[in-house]
Structure formats: structure tokens, C-alpha cells
Amino acid sequence: MKTPIDLRGHHVLCLLTYIGRGYSTSFTENLNTIVSAFHRGHAAKIVSGYDALCHCESTPFHCPHKGSTACRTASVETKDKRTLSALRVFAPHAGHWQIGQAFHFTQPLVAELRQAFKAGSIRPACSSCEWQGLCDEIAASDFRRTLFFSSLPQGPSNTPK
Ligand code: SF4
């Protein structure tokens, strides 16, 4: 059985708008590996706190913000909680959005989540995020150039922020 990939609440949203940009080249390389694993059928497991985007156990990768004051603030955990709560209300997939729950992303689920993202109904976590402008543009373009379960033949660009 393929190992589930740990995912904190608000990173569900960040996957929807991922176009190959992130905090650093190593950050995007790690995220490209995660996206590829989801495409190959790995499950996601919702966790509290640090997840696979924050660090990788098999490589030296750590997000440059991991452990920083900004990262440790309660507001990041609040983002996770508010996202999971918003997802529970919106989707007919309520069982997915709980700590410890594993599930598979599918193209229909991702399409449904993107619709809700574009409508703004699952984005309480985005209001305090430095990437909000970019993610607004990506949603407005109907998620063109996104790499997570995108039907478009785009390769990761590894463009650091
Ligand atoms: S605005 Fe921030 S929290 Fe929201 S999806 Fe984009 S990167 Fe993630």
C-alpha cells in the first residue's frame, strides 16, 4: 500500500493553486514530488501541525519558514482549523476533512474544490496570506497553468518566489 502523504488543513487550498512557485527552489522541488505522488495514487492524510510541505523525512528539505516565529504562531493552526471547517460545510465529502482521516484526491474532487475556491466559500485561510493576490489571479483564470490534477500539459517551473 502506498504511504499516505501528511497534509495540514490550509495546504489543501495551496495545492489547488500551485503553479510551480514557492518560497525557494527546494520548496518547489519538494512540492513537485508531492504533487506527483498524489497523481500516482498516494492518499492524503489530514494532520495537525507540520506536514509534507513543511519538511520531508527522506531528504534534508525543510521549508525556510519552518520553526520561525511566523510559522509557529497560533494563526497558522487557526488557518488549518478554519479551512477544514469550511471544507466540511461545503463538500459532500465530510469524512475527509478531519485530523487523521486519509482519502484520495481525484480529478472530480479537485474540480469541485476549485469551484468552491473560486466562489470564495472555502478560503477563510487566504485572507492573511502573502500569496493571496497570485491565488486570486489563478482562480480568476480558471486555474490555468496549475500543476495539481491539471488537465493541461504543463511542467513544473521551479520558479522561486
Ligand atoms: S492565498 Fe495563501 S493560503 Fe490561500 S491558497 Fe493561496 S497560498 Fe494557500
Image (tube, grey):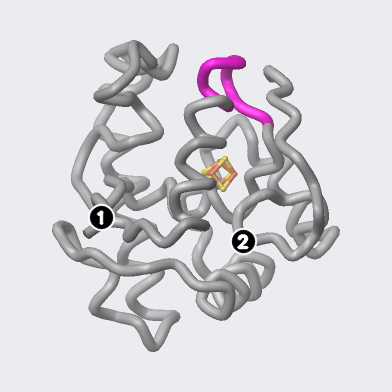
Q: Is residue 137 visible?
A: no
Q: Amino acid at mark 2?
A: Phe
Query: Residue placed at 28% from the left, 72% from the top?
Result: 96
Task: Tell whether circle 1 marks a residue whose Cβ is less than 8 angstroms from ligand 1.
Answer: no
Ligand 1 quarter of the rendering: top right
Query: Residue placed at 68% from the left, 18% from the top?
Result: 160
Query: Residue placed at 48% from the left, 28% from the top?
Result: 30
The residue stretch that appears in magenta? 21-28
Q: Indicate whether 120 appears above or below 60.
A: below
Report the side of 128 relative to 103 (left or right): right
**Image coordinates for residue 149, horizontal then vertical, percent:** 62, 61
- Compare residues 48 and 25 and report the one nearer the observer: 25
Judging by the rendered image, the residue that carries numbered circle 2 is 149
For mark 2, does the 10 Å Cα neighbourhood hold few (<14), some (14 to 19), or many (20 or more) residues? some
**Image coordinates for residue 135, horizontal then vertical, percent:** 69, 46
For mark 1, does the 10 Å Cα neighbourhood hold few (<14), some (14 to 19), or many (20 or more) residues? many
Report the side of 29 relative to 51 (left or right): right
Q: Amino acid at mark 1?
A: Ile
What is the quadrant of the N terminus in the image? bottom left
Q: Is residue 130 visible?
A: yes
Judging by the rendered image, the residue that carries numbered circle 1 is 46
Query: Residue placed at 41% from the left, 19% from the top?
Result: 63
Measured Cα–Cα span from mark 1 to mark 2:
19 Å
What is the quadrant of the C terminus in the image? top right
User: Marks 1 and 2: CB-CB under 8 Å?
Assistant: no
